[in-house]
Image (tube, rainbow, N blue to C red):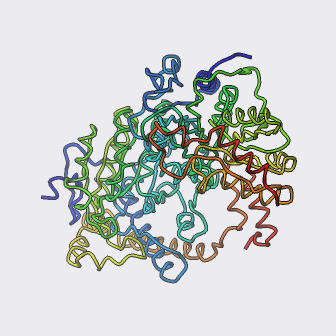
């Protein structure tokens, strides 16, 4: 086990992927000499050359659109979108080509590409730098969407995503880039699309992912002080969602709260609540609740603390599901 | 005036024209082969229009008038090259060896693609205007990294030159000196909008601003298109980077069978372009020079008729796919929503070969 930040873990994971397969290429803005605005690709161009770690012209549709062609040619491109709010120029290529070319070609083309998106808020940024666009992509058939919440997951999930033959939107919780954690560089303990129970509990199931996992774990610690036991599930994969893990938990606790930064309207939590209500109806002891960002554009960051899901808001939801009487 | 800008090797009257930069490399047999290609693809196109009118196709996008542009470019491609069509490049698909029936699968509503793009080295149709330009540049960047002696050619129309993706593709191709040829068929009309709505300057001149050569070729002159496309492809293979070719042509028919061009263009224009017909000029040349016999001309027409009949039979026999096949190629790997959807369709009794 080695302690490192998520940023370093991603860097090491990308380095291993580049080492392991000469077809792996990185494309993005400022990812070469600068090492990316978050330094995730630091030093990689120096070691793997400008033909494999490619400083792209400034156009997101170009980054993804050329990655599509490279994937057609048998390469494994890894695109870096600089910030969540800049992915939309590439939305057309992602939805019309990345997601559909395999089906349109009856399996002739393999879209083995990864689109890395630093996402979420909490870093005091200006507009377009703090968004959570994951639901747009999770909604789109043909894509897979994952989000690591720890350095260990970041290290392994990026390598597994690059090896995978389906296109994967890789959402990196940028506010956790600089938090350290133990990384087991010898073996991955989870599958890429598996949800993981981060903390065992008895009373309430909290399903969350990405930047909110840490917040939920802190809420669980606080609740434990009040004698309430929260089970925290890190979804990890947002498309597909790993419902069996969530169902086992909900059948035990009977209470569900879903937490994420994106607004709840037509969101990942909408799908989780709908599916779990359908499959665990008789286990439910209270209505499922959601603790999310508000349904507004991401606010000026001076008020993002009030916008984002917090420990207090999670604990309020816990009180409501615990106090519900049918 | 127009002719001064165009690379032309055969006048509309079928007279050979010399060009300093582009000498003709084709012998008589090869010119006859190009003529045969054009006659066949027009005949197949007309058959497809009939099939649509008879309710056998959902839609058809005719290529009439653009045969020289498509056959000239399609025959300039080598087997190892890779090409990217939009949705009207039936002539290019024919040159790539794709069967007419495979081309019609899309319009028969049985497939979104129709053929195996890796087998023919010709990508599947792209209907979202201009997306394929970036995909082609990426493919060419892969060719470049492989050090392969191959070129990539991408087809789009005059309307597509207004799309961001096409302009980004120009930027990318220039930045990486990608071995790609952009082949724009300027058929004068983006559905109902004339090319002047897209550009204040001739389209080929756009290339200069991006930093690579642009050439306007008479798109109704198959000899000129062949030579210009061959040279651009060879330049790409040799590391010379991208070229934009504007094939100046005319969409003699409608945009698609859903369109009514009489609402937006003048009969006089259509008539004027009939005198520039790409097939007639080759025929005039071959007949005048006595390079082809009347019997040979008849034989080509008869061959085209037979192919059209075979196409009709193949289309009429073309059934929809098994509904369960919609789940087959969405992902490379197992996916719970796909598994659940397939099972649900089976349980509902909706699956099974129709």
**Near-viewer residue (B9 or A148):** A148
**Seen in the image, is B327 located left or right of residue A109?**
right
In the picture, the quarter occupied by the N terminus of chain A is top right
Q: Using the rendered view, name the quadrant where residue B347 is placed.
A: bottom right
**Near-viewer residue (B202 or B239):** B202
**Near-viewer residue (B30 or A164):** A164
Identify the residue shown where x is 55% and y is 66%: B106
Rendering coords of residue A184 (x, y %): 74, 21
Rendering coords of residue B218 (x, y %): 25, 57
Q: Is residue B53 above or below residue B127?
A: below
Residue at the left extreme, as displayed: B1
Identify the residue shown where x is 70% and y is 32%: A218
| Residue B27 visible in image | no
| Residue B153 visible in image | yes
Identify the residue shown where x is 49% and y is 54%: B96
Rendering coords of residue B249 (x, y %): 28, 62
Rendering coords of residue B269 (x, y %): 21, 73
Q: Using the rendered view, name the quadrant where residue B137 is placed.
A: top left
């Amino acid at each position: 086990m080695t302690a490192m930040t998520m940023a370093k873990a991603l860097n090491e994971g990308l380095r291993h992927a580049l080492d392991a397969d000469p077809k792996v290429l990185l494309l993005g803005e400022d990812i070469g000499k600068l090492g990316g605005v978050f330094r995730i690709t630091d030093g990689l161009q120096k070691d793997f050359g400008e033909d494999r770690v490619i400083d792209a012209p400034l156009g997101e549709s170009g980054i993804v659109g050329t990655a599509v062609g490279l994937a057609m040619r048998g390469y494994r491109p890894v695109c870096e979108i600089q910030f969540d709010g800049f992915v939309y120029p590439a939305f057309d290529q992602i939805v019309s080509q990345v997601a559909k070319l395999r089906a349109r070609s009856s399996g002739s083309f393999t879209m083995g590409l990864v689109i890395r998106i630093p996402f979420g808020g909490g870093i005091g940024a200006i507009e377009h730098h703090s968004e959570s666009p994951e639901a747009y992509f999770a909604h789109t058939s043909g894509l897979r969407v994952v989000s690591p919440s720890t350095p260990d997951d970041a290290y392994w999930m990026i390598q597994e995503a690059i090896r995978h033959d389906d296109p994967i939107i890789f959402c990196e919780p940028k506010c956790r880039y600089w938090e350290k954690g133990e990384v087991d560089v010898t073996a991955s303990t989870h599958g890429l699309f598996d949800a993981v129970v981060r903390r065992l509990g008895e009373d309430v199931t909290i399903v969350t992912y990405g930047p909110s996992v840490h917040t939920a774990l802190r809420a669980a610690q606080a609740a434990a002080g009040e004698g309430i036991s929260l089970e925290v599930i890190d979804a990890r994969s947002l498309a597909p969602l790993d419902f069996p893990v969530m169902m086992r938990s909900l059948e035990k606790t009977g209470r569900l709260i879903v937490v994420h930064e994106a607004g709840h309207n037509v969101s990942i939590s909408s799908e989780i609540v709908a599916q779990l209500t359908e499959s665990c109806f008789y286990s439910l002891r209270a209505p499922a609740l959601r603790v999310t960002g508000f349904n507004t554009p991401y606010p000026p960051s001076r008020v993002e603390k009030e916008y984002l899901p917090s420990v207090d808001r999670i604990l309020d939801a816990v009180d409501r599901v615990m106090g519900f009487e049918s | 005036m127009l002719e001064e800008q165009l690379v032309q090797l055969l006048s509309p009257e079928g007279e050979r024209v010399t060009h300093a930069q582009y000498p003709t490399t084709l012998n008589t047999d090869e010119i006859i082969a190009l003529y045969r290609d054009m006659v066949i693809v027009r005949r197949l196109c007309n058959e497809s229009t009939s099939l649509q009118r008879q309710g056998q196709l959902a839609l058809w996008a005719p290529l009439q008038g653009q045969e020289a542009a498509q056959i000239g470019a399609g025959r300039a491609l080598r087997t190892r090259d890779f090409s990217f069509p939009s949705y009207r490049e039936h002539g290019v698909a024919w040159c790539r060896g794709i069967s007419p029936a495979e081309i019609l699968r899309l319009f028969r509503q049985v497939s979104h693609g129709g053929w195996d793009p890796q087998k023919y080295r010709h990508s599947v149709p792209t209907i979202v205007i201009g997306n394929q330009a970036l995909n082609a540049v990426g493919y060419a960047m892969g060719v470049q990294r492989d050090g392969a002696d191959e070129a990539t050619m991408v087809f789009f129309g005059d309307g597509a030159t207004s799309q961001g993706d096409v302009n980004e593709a120009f930027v990318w191709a220039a930045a990486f000196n990608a071995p790609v040829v952009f082949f724009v068929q300027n058929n004068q009309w983006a559905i109902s909008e004339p090319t002047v709505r897209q550009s204040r300057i001739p389209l080929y001149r756009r290339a200069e601003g991006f930093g690579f050569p642009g050439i306007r070729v008479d798109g109704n002159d198959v000899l000129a298109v062949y030579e210009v496309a061959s040279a651009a492809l060879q330049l790409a293979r040799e590391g010379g980077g991208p070229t934009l070719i504007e094939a100046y042509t005319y969409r003699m028919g409608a945009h698609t069978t859903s369109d009514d061009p009489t609402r937006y263009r003048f009969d006089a224009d259509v008539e004027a372009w009939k005198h520039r017909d790409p097939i007639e000029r080759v025929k005039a040349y071959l007949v005048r020079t006595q390079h082809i016999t009347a019997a040979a001309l008849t034989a080509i027409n008869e061959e085209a008729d037979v192919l059209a009949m075979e196409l009709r039979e193949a289309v009429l026999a073309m059934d929809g796919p098994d509904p369960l096949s919609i789940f087959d190629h969405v992902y490379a790997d197992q996916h719970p929503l796909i598994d659940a959807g397939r099972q649900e369709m089976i349980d509902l009794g909706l699956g099974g070969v129709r």
